[in-house]
Amino acid sequence: GVSAPLPKQATAGLIGTLLLACRHRNLNDMDTRATIEIYATRLAEFPADLTRKVLEDWPLFNAGFPELAALAEKIRILNWRAVAKTRLHRILEQTHGRKH
């Protein structure tokens, strides 16, 4: 199934970590708080497990701080893959009468 969204505070913490781990334009305190708030609010639309994975993995593969659209796209791709895998397993179970 699809997991519930991450609590906003947990998402904000992960975004704060991204700001520390990735290159980004210089932000004053107000801009930093606004960025974290906007990202955390918008990412609340997505499942927690996928959101956490994308936010934690981002600095391992990307040097720069992500645009919100890039994060959303990565989460959507992971969600699509998870849904496709679940559907494939159901089809295989129906076809072969057992779990794979």
Image (cartoon, helix red, strand yellow):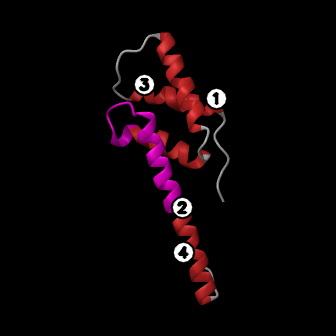
When the figure is inspected, residue 89 is found, relative to residue 55, above or below; the finding is below
Q: CA distance from mark 1 to mark 4?
A: 35 Å
Q: Which residue is mark 1?
A: 9
Q: Residue at x 58, y 80 (%)?
A: 91
Q: Which residue is mark 2?
A: 82
Quadrant assignment for the C terminus? bottom right
Residue 99, numbered circle? none
Q: CA distance from mark 3 to mark 1?
A: 17 Å
Circle 2/circle 3 CB separation < 8 Å? no
Q: Which residue is mark 3?
A: 20
- The earlier-in-sequence mark between 4 and 3 is 3
- The earlier-in-sequence mark between 4 and 2 is 2
What is the three-letter code of the residue carrying label 4?
Leu
| Label 3 element class | helix
Q: Nearer the viewer, mark 2 or mark 1?
A: 2
What is the three-letter code of the residue carrying label 3?
Leu
Q: Quadrant of residue 44?
A: top right
Q: CA distance from mark 2 to mark 3?
A: 30 Å
Near mark 1 (Cα within 10 A), the count class, few <14, some 14-19 or many ≥20, is few
Residue 1 percent across, percent down from the top left: 66, 60
Q: CA distance from mark 2 to mark 1?
A: 25 Å
- The earlier-in-sequence mark between 2 and 1 is 1
Circle 3/circle 1 CB separation < 8 Å? no
What is the three-letter code of the residue carrying label 2?
Ala
Q: Which residues are magenta?
A: 59-81
